[in-house]
Image (tube, rainbow, N blue to C red):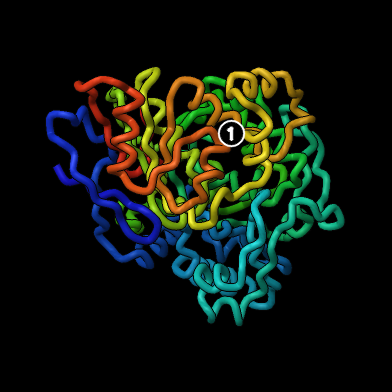
Amino acid sequence: MEMKLPYGKGAVSFELPRERLAGILQGRPCVPEKDAVTIVRESMENPIGSKRLWQLAQGKKDIVILTSDHTRPVPSRVILPLMLKELRRGSPGARIRILVATGCHRKMTGKELKEKFGEELLAEEEIVTHDCEDEENLVSLGTLPSGGELKINRLGVWADLLVAEGFIEPHFFAGFSGGRKSVLPGIASRTCVHYNHNSAFIDHPCARAGILEGNPIHEDMVYAAKKAGLAYIVNVVFNSERQVIASFAGDGELAHGAGCRFVRELTLCAPVMADVVVTTNNGYPLDQNIYQMVKGISSAGATCKKGGVIIALGACEDGVGASGFYETFRKWDRVSDMLTDFRKVPPDKTVTDQWQSQILARILEDHTVILVSEADRDAVKNLKMIPAASVQEAFHLAEGILKKDDYKVTVIPEGISVVIG
């Protein structure tokens, strides 16, 4: 069988003997019945649990729209013009700022800003980037349910109206992306994000893809969004071709909840346990670095036999993507020791990227991960994974590790877009 999986801005093809295939895990195919603009506009015309956006904007003078950064494929060129049109209909004279909710990520480059917003929006709109360490622009809103201090960007706190655009997909520890994540981690302080991503929460059995109920990370995020006054969202859903197939607009919690239920029904797959699992990070922009690749690897871990091999495909043109993540793995020789030490760290002492390191270490404790990428081979080795230049090389390495002829393979074409359970 010929397999064609997303990789960077293109795809990687390889052949797999049919008798080796245990199963292919992917969401239900869905073809959009309308164009993206129409889908988004109709959702905004029929908001869930909320007034129309133009009605919410009436009388408001200072409006902030939260948007994600370059690591998320939110179609801002589609969504933002529709949101801006409604906002200006309701309050023509309002000052509207677009706040890039970077969380703890780096600042976007000029090229990335242009790709995301387009030259017209860049030239005409006021766009500000969140900095999680800029204390002068952070305001405390008290304490999260978990005990951490809720500290977020002052623009979000002082806005007369705070709204957000985004997209919904399974998320490997928050349950689903979108909605409340625009606030926490989107515009939160680094210490706030660290507390929310603490080792006990990451280890919690409900902090997994597709789970919201009982998920302590999600519960903190919902509280933060309410406390910040997130009044309205527009969140879209994609199919495997990165086409918008649905949009959910309205109340930050109710619209997001409806979107999550839709995505869960679309992406839920029963595990097909196998000796080898091939996964991806859905291609560009989600496979830009190794740090982000942990998401697709996490999905594979849910359906790979103990002692099995995960083959992860991702271009990783930006390399590792997070220095803290990288240095953590260089510090420890054994992932079991890393996990032991992480679990002793109190929430207020959580260090940068600890959560990502913890999840990858948890997977590596039971599996070997082979990474097919453009990343530096030594960097991959330092992250306790095995580098490979091609899928063919990866399978050759896997066979040497397994030392068995009758191994089976499960393929996850889009590792981020499935809920395995």
Q: Where residue 373 sits in the image (x, y, percent)?
A: 42, 49
Assign the C terminus to one quadrant of the image.
top left
Query: Where is 250 relative to 393, above or below?
Result: below
Residue at 59 percent of width and 19 percent of height? 336
- Image side of residue 36 versus residue 255, left or right: left
Q: Please, what secondary structure does the residue beneath circle 1 have? A: helix
Considering every residue shown, the one lying at the far right of the view is: 136
Task: Give the quarter of the image for residue 226.
Answer: top right
Q: In the image, residue 151 lies at what x, y percent?
A: 78, 44
Assign the N terminus to one quadrant of the image.
Answer: top left
Picture coordinates of residue 37, whole percent (x, y): 38, 67
> Residue visible at 13% across and 34% down?
18
For residue 77, side relative to residue 189 (left or right): left
Q: How many marks?
A: 1
Q: Nearer the viewer, residue 270 or 234?
A: 270
Decide: few, some or many residues near mark 1? Use Cα within 10 Å; few <14, some 14-19, many ≥20.
Answer: many
Type of amino acid under label 1? His
Q: Nearer the viewer, residue 78 or 351?
A: 351
The residue at 54%/44% (across/down) is 378
Judging depth in this view, the residue of 404 and 37 nearest the camera is 404
State whether residue 196 appears in this view: yes
Q: Quadrant of residue 17?
A: top left
Whether 420 is drawn above or below 382: the answer is: above
Asked whether residue 262 appears in the rendered view, the answer is no
Q: Nearer the viewer, residue 165 or 7?
A: 7
Above or below, 94 against 206 in this view is: below
Give the side of residue 415 with respect to residue 199, left or right.
left
Give percent across and percent down for residue 50: 53, 51
Mark 1 sits on what residue?
A: 218
